Amino acid sequence: GDYGNDVTREALVEFHSQKIHAIQRASQHNQKKNSDLALTHNNNNINNTIDAIAIETVPSRLECQALAELLLKNTSISNDSKCSPLPPLAVWISLACRNETELNDGTPLIEALSIFQTIPTDRLMAIGLNCC
């Protein structure tokens, strides 16, 4: 859970924003490609849309804060003009724990969970734990 002193919450927000937008662009590309196939082959059962994204092994309070900020903003802070606002899809987050009560960085689990309290359930559908 220690990314060093050079990693900021803003950098983590940008990192996750870029990853989500890459998934979004790939999904949009697949939708167009499959739409073209459906028109060509008259097959309307093709659907490669993304309904949810898993963000796994989050090891620190700082990264929890960055993810909560990103999910609450629902906008991109990226300078990439190809990025539209974050897609209205749900995420689930799994936290990486060193034991039954702490994240890998030593943050009490209850504190990490409280960071996500204000996120609507249509955006954050589940929180899980890894490596306990």
Image (cartoon, rainbow, N blue to C red):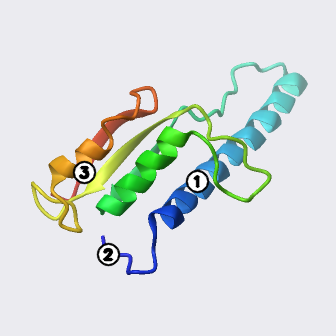
Which quadrant: the C terminus? bottom left
In the image, residue 11 lies at what x, y percent? 52, 66
Q: Nearer the viewer, residue 17 or 55?
A: 17
Q: Is residue 72 above or below residue 62?
A: above
Q: Are marks 2 and 3 in contact (CB under 8 Å)?
A: no
| Residue denoted by label 2 | 2
Q: Nearer the viewer, residue 41 or 39?
A: 39
The residue located at (30%, 41%) in the rendering is 127
Determine crowd level at label 1: few under 14, some 14-19, many 20+ residues with C-alpha closer than 10 A: many
- Give amino acid for label 1: Ser
Q: Is residue 25 above or below residue 15?
A: above
Q: Disc 2 or 3, which lies upstream in sequence?
A: 2
| Separation (CA) of disc 2 from disc 3 | 15 Å
The mark found on residue 17 in the picture is 1
In the rendered view, does 116 fall on the left or right side of 85?
left
| Separation (CA) of disc 3 from disc 1 | 20 Å
Q: Secondary structure at mark 2?
A: loop
Q: Nearer the viewer, residue 33 or 5?
A: 5
In the image, residue 43 lies at what x, y percent? 77, 21
The mark found on residue 62 in the picture is none
* Residue 78 picture quarter: bottom right
In the image, residue 59 lies at what x, y percent? 30, 63
Determine crowd level at label 2: few under 14, some 14-19, many 20+ residues with C-alpha closer than 10 A: few
Report the label total. 3
Determine crowd level at label 3: few under 14, some 14-19, many 20+ residues with C-alpha closer than 10 A: many
The mark found on residue 112 in the picture is 3
